[in-house]
Amino acid sequence: MPETDAYSVKKLSPSEPMVTIRLFIEVPRQIPLTKIEKTLSRKYGYKTMITSPYSLEARISMPIRLLSELLDKVESTIRDLSVKASSICIDYYVVLKTDKCLCNIYDDKKIIKREVLGSKIFCLVEISDDIVAFIYCRLDKKRYQTIRFLEKEKFTSSDLLQLPKTLFIRCKWEDHAKEVKRIRYNIETFINNILLETM
């Protein structure tokens, strides 16, 4: 069940959504991982965490109004690392700190599925003909929600509580520029078709 990380929630203002992008990077044995880590943190401003002798996670968050700047930075990062890394996977989501859960206030006609578990609400919302948004709301003291995106054809589970995190992580793409463009399209579609309608 996908949840957000404490780092993203800590950076939230009450009114401004944040976009978080995580890169999962594996490198060949002959390339020092510490060198990659320094490039990510010093040149691009990522928070990094080494997860194994040959892999690390890099994470960066910016306000949604700086989406273009964020995605330009991510595209440059992937381009820079593509000749050094043996594998790059990407995960991204929007984090919104608010008392209003989008699952409760959005048009029911667009909600494909909705489930409640205590103070947590989950729903799957259609945001375009081919893209759905998975929305996870916490209505306890933390009061935030995360929004992830998925091609409609990839959603096969009937239980929103059992969605694997790997469902939202992409590891294979032919063109990193097209991949970043796809992320931009999904987030901008969410802004225009859901966020602006409900704020």
Image: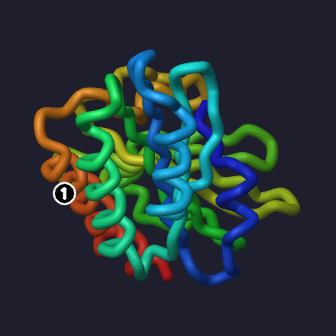
Sort mark 1 into few (<14), some (14-19) or many (20+) by Cα contacts within 10 Å: some
* 159 shown above or below 45: above
Q: 59 left or right of 197? A: right
What residue sits 31% from the left and 33% below the top?
84
Q: What residue type is labelled 1?
A: Lys
SS label for mark 1: helix
**Quadrant assignment, res 169:** top left
Taking depth in this image into account, of 65 and 60 the one nearest to the observer is: 60
Taking depth in this image into account, of 80 and 129 the one nearest to the observer is: 80
Q: 104 left or right of 179? A: right
Residue under label 1: 181
**Quadrant assignment, res 155:** top left
Q: Which residue lies furthest to the right in this view?
A: 141
Q: 96 left or right of 9? A: left
Q: Measuring from the top left, give residue 51's x and y in whole percent.
A: 63, 27
* 30 shown above or below 192: above
* 195 shown above or below 49: below
What residue sits 12% from the left and 34% below the top?
174
